[in-house]
Image (cartoon, rainbow, N blue to C red):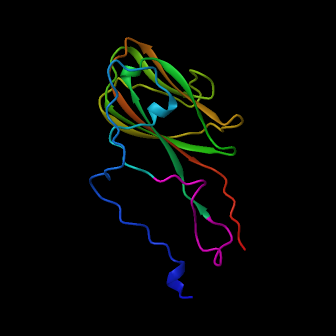
């Protein structure tokens, strides 16, 4: 058997237009329904992704028995039209939160709008972000140690919030098991 019979070459991926059978994510209708974690993770600019069942390991086990682990992210699109809410975002056991990245695409309106990240519903133990500022991007380390039940709550607080758009990325690492043999 030749070595090439063991190599998988994925089909080419179109660079601009999605395949005809790929669903196109449309903008959410107005007025907005109460968000779910699924709607927070849908971005109208999203492209078709690939789901992995575990963390990605890198490195040659013949050189080093310790593999590198690719850092993972959860990306959320929070729209002011959702109003106020608090939803749980569950992480795998053993997760280490490393940082969050905030991109304020469009400032939130309303009175005292806040996007909160905490370990309790409406909590601010990780962060309280002001989305009413001008369009900007920030990258902030997370110092909180996440423990059971491995849940972070994403909340929006304030009154009269009807517009605005924020992209939020939560960076984290999980323990990985490599089976060698």
**In the depicted view, which residue is nearer to us: 8 or 161?**
8
Q: Is residue 170 left or right of residue 95?
A: left
Give above or below for 145 relative to 52.
above
**Quadrant placement of the N terminus:** bottom right
Residue 54, by quadrant, is bottom right
Q: Is residue 69 left or right of residue 21?
A: right
Is residue 52 within the magenta segment? yes
Is residue 62 within the magenta segment? yes
**Quadrant placement of the C terminus:** bottom right
* Residue pictured at 42% horizontal, 17% vertical: 83
Which residue is situated farthest in the front direction here? Answer: 21
User: x%, y% of residue 55?
Assistant: 59, 55
Which residue is situated farthest in the left direction here? Answer: 16
Q: Which residues are magenta?
A: 50-67
Which residue is situated farthest in the bottom direction here? Answer: 1
* Residue pictured at 51% horizontal, 46% vertical: 73
Residue 78, by quadrant, is top left
Count the numbered circles shown. Answer: 0
User: x%, y% of residue 145?
Assistant: 66, 39
* Residue pictured at 27% horizontal, 54% vertical: 16
User: x%, y% of residue 166?
Assistant: 38, 32
Magenta: main secondary structure = loop
User: x%, y% of residue 45?
Assistant: 32, 42
* Residue pictured at 35% horizontal, 14% vertical: 110
């Amino acid at each position: 058997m030749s070595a090439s019979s063991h190599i998988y070459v994925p089909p080419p991926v179109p660079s601009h237009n999605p395949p005809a059978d790929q669903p196109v994510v449309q903008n959410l209708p107005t007025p907005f329904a109460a968000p779910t974690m699924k709607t927070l993770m849908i971005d109208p600019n999203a492209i078709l992704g690939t789901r992995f069942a575990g963390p990605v390991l890198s490195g040659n086990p013949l050189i080093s028995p310790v593999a590198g682990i690719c850092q993972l992210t959860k990306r959320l699109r929070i729209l002011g039209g959702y109003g106020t809410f608090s939803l749980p975002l569950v992480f795998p056991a053993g997760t280490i939160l490393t940082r969050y990245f905030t991109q304020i695409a469009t400032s939130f309106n309303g009175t005292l709008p806040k996007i909160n990240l905490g370990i309790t519903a409406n909590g601010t133990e990780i962060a309280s972000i002001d989305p009413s500022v001008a369009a900007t991007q920030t990258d902030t380390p997370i110092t909180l140690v996440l423990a059971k039940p491995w849940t972070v709550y994403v909340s929006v607080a304030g009154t009269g919030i009807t517009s605005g758009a924020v992209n939020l990325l939560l960076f984290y690492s999980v323990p990985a098991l490599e089976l060698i043999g």
